[in-house]
Image (cartoon, rainbow, N blue to C red):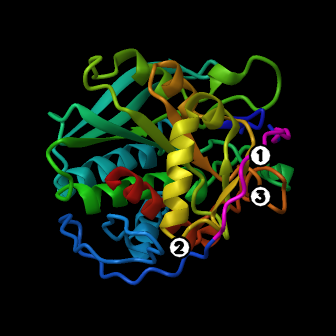
Amino acid sequence: METFLKKLAVFPVILLYTAICLTSGAAVLCSCTGSNGNSTAQTSAISTDTIRTVAVCADSLYAHVEKQVALGPRTPGSTSHDRCVALVAGYMNSCGVDTTMVQSAPVVTFKGEKFTANNIFSQINPAADNRVLLIAHYDTRPWADSDPDEAMHSTPIDGANDGASGVAVLMEVARVLAHELPDSLGVDLLFADMEDSGESGGDDTETTWCLGTQEWVKQMPYTAKNRPRFGILLDMVGGKDALFHREYFSQRHASPVVDKVWSIARRSGFGDRFVNKAGGAVVDDHLFINRAGIPCIDIIESINEQTGSFNPTWHTMSDNLSAIDRNSLHAAAQTVVNTILN
């Protein structure tokens, strides 16, 4: 991804929002099951008004990140990339989602390199017309081009936060919701490929990013009747003490969805994480989902206190497992689950 920001530097966006009362999200207590997808509904840090929930598990989320990072950098064309496809697709099947397929398409990077983008697409309750789409990219940046050590600029990154964290949330959503949804509600999970091989800086670089999603929207498996009501992209949601501001393009193209998600986050006890203020403008997969006719938002850390934009580990060799915060993962995942259920 890039910002205007991208995933360049965030520019300030002057928008005003009504202030809300912030509450602290407490640590979740849960017992996680194995990869068979069985889960027990539990109460987890849900505050004030009644809200339907199925508890996610912070330890399970962290384990999903850990397993991806253990494969090595998931760069296009690498063995680690292929193993990640097998890992995610296999996990979806073990969770009991109804369908999982890998959709392949040829792509060419801005460097002229040719790859096959492999988008993994899973559905829960595929017959339901009332649908929600979740998206995360699983590929990792082939170059640590923002690392403070220029000697590292050609080295691929682990992508614990930028890549694995969003995928971890989708995997956890599948674990807890595969057998919990009413038949009338469907959830689609798109694990997008070739998001992070774009050109940083320069003009007209927007379409060099998110190559997998650009191909996926050309062959979306929807009719006018069952097109998802909205989509949620999760990207870089595992950083230390991450705060999620209202990303600019999300607010511009899907403001009712932003309102809904941020309200659910506050009601769920995560108002301190989901900040009711304007965020940066990020070129990310949600741009192309919106252009395809599905209102889609981006949950992403875009105004880090230290950098004023992305997390300081972004596109550096420091984007490794030590940079991951279980509580950040938990806040993002529980908010998504609660949004789907309410």
- The residue to which callout 1 is attached is 153
Q: Which residue is labeled 2 in the image?
A: 326
Give the distance between the C-alpha atoms of the residues marked 2 and 3, in whole angstroms.
Answer: 17 Å
Task: Find residue 198 and report its image quarter.
Answer: top right
Dominant secondary structure of the residues highlighted in magenta in the image: loop
Question: Relative to 320, is 100 on the left or the right?
Answer: left
Q: Give the range drawn in magenta.
A: 10-22
Residue at screen point 72% across, 43% down: 154
* Residue holding disc 3: 304
**In the picture shown, does residue 184 fall above or below 301?**
above
Marks 2,3: beta carbons within 8 A: no
Residues 157 and 203: in front is: 203
162, 72: nearer the viewer: 162
Please state, as top left, top right, bottom left or bottom right, where the C terminus lies in the image: bottom left
- The mark total stands at 3
Residue visible at 23% across and 66% down in the picture: 35
Task: Reply above or below: 58 against 139.
Answer: below
Separation of residues labelled 2 and 1 (CA atoms): 28 Å
